Amino acid sequence: MPKAIPAAPVILKNFLEIPYDELEAMNLEAAEAAEKLPAAELEKKYRAYLRNEKRLKAVTLCFSDIEGRFHMLDYDKHFFLNASDNLTFDGSSIRGFSSQKESDLRLGTDWKSIFWLPSDVFGPGKVILFGTVLNRDKTPYESDFRTRLAQLARELKKTRGLTANVAAEVEGFVVKGSNSEQAYNESVGFSLISAGGYFHSLPLDPLKAFIDTAAEAQRAMGFRNEKDHPEVAPSQFELNFSYAGVVRACDLIQLYKLVCRQVAANMGMTATFLPKPVSGVNGSGMHLNLSFFKDGKNVFYDKKGEDGLSKTAWDAISRLLNHAQELSLILNSSVNAYRRLDPHFEAPNQIKVSSVDRGSMIRIPAGNERSARIEIRSVGPDANPYLSLYALLRTAIDGEPLTKDDGKRDRVRYLPGNVYDAIRLFRGSEFIRKVLGESSHEKYVFHKQASADRSPKELGSIVKTSEVLFHHDVTTQMLWHKF
């Protein structure tokens, strides 16, 4: 008797999986359309796409809280299309959002922000969009700084004709083991995956394998990567991507961190964006390169200006330097961030501007009429990018310029050396209170104080367990209720 031929396996799932080259083309096309087409037209286009693409199972809608944590909700595709004008969530369960008595918040959809995801990193059958957090009456929620940043960008364009462009350089570390932040113990510390350093890790060592995998995913998502490399410290990385409008630049920062965390997790490791996870080596920063354009021209550029910068650029620098100390809690938003501001490790803790000194909080990179910019180096990688750029733009435009007393010798000022001093300066600043609004100002400082209270006042030379476990970027939410 001949053997029976087994039946071909039935394919039960047929979810969307897109090759990387096609994925990159789709994401770049979407980014270009977002700059040229009105939101209503894009909503019509992508609604039709979601309806017609049978292999899509869910839409991921994401947003960031006031401290910068990245939150994601997956909606069934059909439910999302039918109920997108009435998507609600419990704001009181989001740290830094609403109180229990005003818990219901809504989510709107920014149809300009669609991304298709690499299925081998995130799983098949999903797209991701950024949400706008709304009150019950559908007005913008005041602590959603992505929405506030978008409003500010529109206002600058309408009233002054200015477009703010940003390129971010975000550094991080890869350490051994999954969930290594949650398992952190100060007596052991983090275990580094590589002893290599700046530009010279072996091509197939774990750090380079991580960098290559993350960079491939980011290129496929339309990041327009420029260079990807190990950084100065062992196990440290930086993946550079091109500049964008200020809101999209912040979206890319949040997705960059998400991609890095997921790629590392898939490899059995942890990507951490603690500013100083390891003592004795360089910390991680999030350098923000800022420029203003008007009618297609870079208004920060002046061939004859000092260091190639215009008066507009120098005015912005003056205002940022003047308000640097009170901005510090926004740009360096954690207990751990003040370990990074150590002058022994190229730390940008000096309140000054320089074209050569990397200890300056603002640097002037070499540039031309397209690339002239200011580099704000003092920002930590764990800062809320939307809140940071909102505060920086408002300060660059509306802040008080730095004044000098000709009768006194110039002395270098420094950023706060610990989070307690930063909190005190933030609390006492009427300018920052006005920029953020009373409620957001109080809400933000309340949570920063809570973080500070959970750690020793003196930083010391050892990264403490408390500053990792109670860090706002680490997913240990249940611990906050046990303190």
Image: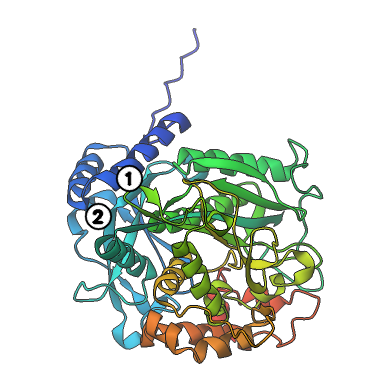
Question: As rendered, which of 270 and 152 lies closer to the eye?
Answer: 152
Pointer 2 with pointer 1, Cβ within 8 A: no
- Mark 2 neighbour class, 10 Å CA radius: few under 14, some 14 to 19, many 20 or more: some
- Left or right for 151, reference 93: left
Give how far across and how far down residue 30 sits, in percent. 33, 41
Residue 57 marker: 1
Please tell me which residue is depicted at 74% across the width and 63% down the height of the picture. Answer: 346
Q: Which residue lies furthest to the top in this view?
A: 1
- Quadrant in the rendering for residue 380: bottom right
The foreground one among 413 and 215 is 413
Neighbourhood count class around disc 1 (C-alpha, 10 Å): few under 14, some 14–19, many 20 upward: some
In the rendered structure, the answer to whether residue 114 lies left or right of residue 452 reads: left
Position of 159 with respect to 342 (left or right) is: left
Q: Nearer the viewer, residue 94 or 378?
A: 378
Residue carrying label 2: 80
For marks 2 and 1, the one nearer the N-term is: 1
The kind of residue tagged 1 is Lys
Mark 2 element type: helix
Where residue 153 sits: x, y (%)?
Answer: 33, 62
Q: Is residue 463 above or below residue 120?
A: below
Residue at 58% in and 61% down: 286
Which x, y percent locates residue 237? 67, 51
What is the distance, in whole Å, between disc 2 and disc 1 at their CAs?
A: 11 Å
Picture layout, residue 66 above or below residue 110: below
